[in-house]
Image: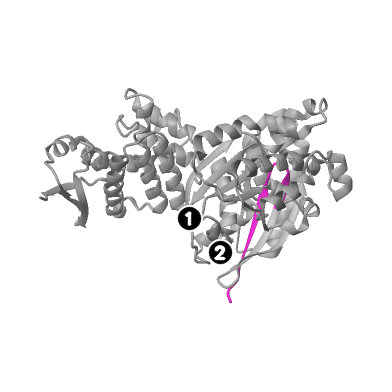
Amino acid sequence: MQITSFAAVYIGSYDIILELFEISKKTGIKRVDTIRHRLELGKEVIAEGKISASTVDALCEILLDYRRIIDGYQADGFRVIASSAMRQAQNNLFILGKIQLLTGFHVEILSNSELRFLNYKSVASIESRFNACIEKGTAIVDLDSGSIQISLFDKNALVNTQNIRIGILLIRERLSQIARETTDYTTLVEEYIQNEISSYKKMYLKDRKIENVILLGDVFTWPGIRSIEPELSGSVMNREEFQSWYQKLADVPPAELCRNFGLNQEYASLIIPAAIIYHRFVEELGASSVWLPGEDPVRGLAYEFAEQKKLMKMQHDFDHDIYMAGRHIGKRYAVNKAHVDNMDMTATALFDAAKKVHGRGSRERLLLRLAVMLHGVGKYISCNGVPESNYNIIMANEIIGLSHAEREMVALITKYNTLEFPAYEEMRENSSLSKKQYLITAELTAILRVANALDRSHKQKVQSIRTVWKEQQLTVHLHVSQDYTLELGTIGEKLEFFSEVFGVRPELKVRREG
């Protein structure tokens, strides 16, 4: 049996974690060791906006130890990621440079949507239980230091995901002074978060029935939490059992938690607001079942590594989840569903046909499909200034699983669907895209423009599309149901840009049926 080893380092808001895994087709992903060092980066960032020199030195010492362990383990692969604390630190570039110099680690600072997607993958890696869970209405409630992500599933598909800025470290720091003036800390926290929860329910739940809640977040991966209710780690419980667990924490001073369960002061001060938030969501969602997987994003890294190296057969289609998250945004902004579905058919056919020229893969194809879905969201605001509105709406809405750069690429593709595509130097004035990302954006914009022009009347005249690539010539065969004069008369400029980008001008051959 072939076993592949993998190591992952997570620079979180409270802890620096190293986890070592063994991966095989027979046993799946097996965690063989976990090393954890306490370091409150998030506290410094919230208080000062940056991480102090002494804390950076401590971080580098920890990472240097981790490097020695990984080298000794002779891992077949490893990744190092950082969370919101590093992302929000004003001096993060200096810190990353120092880490690379001293340890050789290249640290990836993940966006919120990427980090949440890893948390989600860590749970999905427990495939049998996860797949059974999301057959019915399920909410993943993922709580970290600065915010909470709620992702809704139904019939095995992601239907909605939203981020709310209520996190445990943020709450602890914001309410620390007020808390001294009350003996009812639970009510204080509940009042602080209730408006956000009520707004979420009104906008996104409506008549949706939630039967299962999956609770994620750092609080359920801390070793100390298991001392409160050891049998709950990784378990599924009903609401009454969860309520019993919650009552062991509610209205209990941190000092008493430390005495009763052997927790340190920092753990205790964060566990209480976390428990209150989880409790409120379980109650508001009305779920009958609560699952605490006890997993963190590090396992998600191992899952991604296994996926990329084809070490295991993955059952869940994560790209479809990303697409469905984008589709939900389109629905919220009232896009023309028939139009975008018709464009999706033609755009993906053009992408696949031109693959010999552009050489892009499934990820770029997904970005194109998202751009197709969202290219008209700006009309929700006004029929004037649609390109800029498209861009602003997409940039204001996180799409789980996409990096910030990928979301910006989608936003720019929709923006330049109708505006003149700028030179790289001009785009760089207001964008952080690399030259490679700029080229991909241009290619996908060219395809989007042609696909949009093929349904210029929004009557979905194209019934089917077939592409033929022969002798450096792309021929597009269209079967249409109605007169196609408008589309053929207005598509010329779009084909010119396609030719400019790819060096090939598609030849359209139209056949009317019926």
In the image, residue 399 lies in the stretch drawn in magenta = no
The reply to whether residue 260 is visible in this rendering is: yes
Could you tell me residue 20's position as x and y percent? 67, 61
Could you tell me residue 467's position as x and y percent? 22, 54
Quarter of the image for the N terminus: give it. bottom right
In the image, residue 16 lies in the stretch drawn in magenta = yes
Residue to which mark 2 is pinned = 128
Measure the alpha-carbon separation of dots 2 and 1.
12 Å
x 17%, y 38%: residue: 487
- Residue contact at pointers 2 and 1, CB within 8 angstroms: no
Q: Quadrant of residue 24?
A: bottom right
Compared with residue 504, is residue 49 higher up or lower down, i.e. above or below?
Answer: above
Could you tell me residue 497's position as x and y percent? 25, 38
x 46%, y 47%: residue: 322
x 57%, y 41%: residue: 112
The reply to whether residue 83 is visible in this rendering is: no
Which numbered marker is on residue 156? 1
Numbered label tally: 2
Compared with residue 293, is residue 431 higher up or lower down, i.e. above or below?
Answer: above
Q: Is residue 360 left or right of residue 157?
A: left
Q: Amino acid at mark 2?
A: Ser
Q: Secondary structure at mark 2?
A: helix
In this view, which residue lies farthest toward the right?
Answer: 259
Q: Nearer the viewer, residue 423 or 16?
A: 16
Q: Nearer the viewer, residue 289 or 258?
A: 289
Other residues around mark 2 within 10 Å, as few (<14) / some (14–19) / many (≥20): few
The dominant secondary structure in magenta is strand
Q: Secondary structure at mark 1?
A: loop
Q: Which residues are magenta?
A: 1-17
Earlier sequence position, callout 2 versus callout 1: 2
Q: Amino acid at mark 1?
A: Asn
